[in-house]
Image (cartoon, coloured by chain):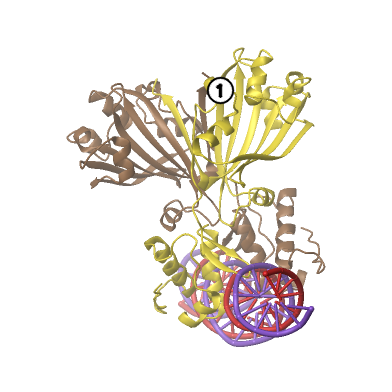
Chain colours: A brown, B yellow, C red, D purple
DNA sequence: ACCCTACAGTCCCCTGGACGACTGGAGGAG
DNA sequence: CTCCTCCAGTCGTCCAGGGGACTGTAGGGT
């Protein structure tokens, strides 16, 4: 771990020069994921700057999501999350027929331990966005909220909205909807699924999302809103998911027509 | 613009309380897009804190991408960028047959003035990712790099990679490939397009990307890597695009199978 | 009428200092 | 040997101050 010096004639301010040198050390592999960065005290000594200046350099890297500070321990190069590739056929009927919901099937394949918690099932008035997608009027919707874990670490929070008229009195309103998940139950109830649309955006997380997903600073989220349509062309479910962005690659395939 | 006070018994530190109050004012509409926030001096007077503390509160909101500081002028609530909805049929042949590349056709529809600049066309050795996607060996690729503007503001940077064997000696290697864009030229050359795959991720921008897209702090980017396949099943182009995340919604449609 | 110069207001960057909270390990008490 | 206490190292937060750079405007000179 060899750091350079600060050039006062450089047009970049000192804190940025320090940040650039640390970033370069990470990119060059001198600092590997999990390694501790020089402490604030070490940086102030090495560069002969005030502690606030060293802190600002580290703040820069935190904002980029490259390092994580742990109170009382140090600042560490962030370990890249294992990437989940989500193919657009992950909701294919063949997976449901194997008796597993999409998430479990996939975790199995990756050899990781899946988990679901923070399950909450309530009836609520639909937001304008949900109402538009489900083509509803004033009807209440069933909201199924849950958090997905992989090897004990939260990776996604999701809320499904279904029209009350469809969900009422079916296992969909239970915490555990049974083998194949709620899509299997929808088909049991006569709503054979035909296709999905997904709308993908990215943004910085809210404080609440940062807490639930245990995200460090500087990590954006992917927001995927999926609408499921049955063979009648009726939208039967809207699923609003928020994922830690670095842990995902979404794959889609579409014709040139 | 009415701000509260700091509660020293609150478990949130003062800078966070100030940030929360400012954020609430934005969410409540007391501060609208384009409005100036109270200056550092005003905040220090109002809350009786040191200037560093007021700065830290503002830093918090900048990291969330909610406000933008302008040197010498003030700190302003960020104006949400107009959202482009990108449907997965935007590369459909019918649009090309109208004689316009996908981007121009869409800008027209939205009534905005499109622009393309920073065009660079070079032959380079393919990166491992590109080589894998194009199923190439050591062959060089043509790299078409450009930046897209809408009403003069940069919204996307893109690099297309094509195998030299396909691009050489065609208008694809020219700065202006002619009506319908390079996809039309690929079909002229006998590579009739069959389908695309897109891989979508999100992350914080690099410094270079932040500069080229003129992004303020705290704004993530969407990365879309599209591969085009011809009717032989051969990948003929890889297009790597980086977009300012808040300005985009990507839409995909896929069957339940 | 035009241009140029001050200047006040604003954010940017840095210094040096202080206290608090958390972590992990060393060393002593039992 | 076990448990507890203490302490050094680390990051989190805050204070008070100073110089710098940028912006827009008011006012004066031409």
| Tally of numbered discs | 1
At mark 1, the secondary structure is loop
Q: Is residue B119 left or right of residue B64?
A: right
Residue A27, above or below A182: below
Say which residue label 1 marks.
B98
Image location of residue A179, percent across then percent down: 31, 29
Q: Chain of mark 1?
A: B
Q: Is residue A229 left or right of residue B117?
A: left
Residue A67 location, quadrant: bottom right
Rendered location of residue A55, percent (x, y):
64, 68
The residue at 42%/63% (across/down) is B26
Residue B131 as seen in the image, left or right of residue A100: right
Please say if A212 is above or below A44.
above
| Mark 1 crowd level (few <14, some 14–19, many ≥20, 10 Å Cα) | few
At 56% from the left and 72% from the top, the residue drawn is B55
Q: Is residue A90 visible in this depiction of the protein?
A: yes
Residue A81 showing in the rendered view? no
The residue lying toward the viewer, choosing from A75 and A167, is A167
Quarter of the image with the N terminus of chain B is bottom left
Q: Is residue B250 or residue B225 the one in the foreground?
A: B250
- Tell me which corner region of the image, top left, top right, bottom left or bottom right, holds residue C18: bottom right
Quadrant of the drawing holding the C terminus of chain B: top left
Q: Is residue A242 above or below residue C3?
A: above
**Residue at left offset 54%, top offset 41%:** B112
Q: Position of residue B29 (x, y in %)?
A: 39, 62
């Amino acid at each position: 771990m060899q750091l350079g010096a600060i050039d006062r004639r450089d047009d970049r301010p000192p804190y940025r020069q320090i940040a650039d040198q640390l970033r370069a050390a990470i990119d060059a592999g001198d600092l590997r994921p999990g390694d501790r960065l020089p402490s604030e005290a070490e940086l102030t000594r090495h560069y002969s700057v005030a502690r606030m200046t060293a802190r600002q350099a580290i703040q820069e890297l935190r904002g980029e999501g490259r390092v994580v500070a742990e109170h009382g321990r140090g600042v560490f190069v962030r370990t890249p999350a294992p990437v989940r590739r989500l193919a657009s056929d992950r909701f294919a009927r063949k997976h449901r027929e194997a008796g597993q919901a999409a998430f479990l099937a996939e975790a199995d394949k990756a050899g990781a331990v899946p988990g679901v918690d923070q399950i909450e099932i309530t009836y609520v008035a639909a937001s304008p966005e949900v109402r538009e997608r489900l083509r509803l009027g004033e009807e209440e919707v069933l909201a199924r909220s849950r958090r997905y874990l992989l090897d004990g670490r939260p990776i996604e929070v999701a809320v499904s909205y279904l029209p009350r008229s469809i969900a009422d009195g079916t296992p969909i309103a239970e915490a555990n909807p049974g083998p194949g998940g709620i899509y299997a139950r929808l088909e049991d109830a006569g709503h054979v699924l035909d296709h999905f649309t997904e709308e993908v955006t990215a943004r910085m997380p809210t404080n609440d999302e940062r807490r639930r997903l245990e995200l460090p600073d500087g990590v954006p989220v992917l927001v995927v809103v999926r609408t499921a349509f049955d063979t009648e062309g009726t939208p039967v479910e809207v699923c609003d998911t928020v994922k830690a962005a670095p842990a995902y690659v979404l794959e889609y395939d579409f014709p040139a027509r």
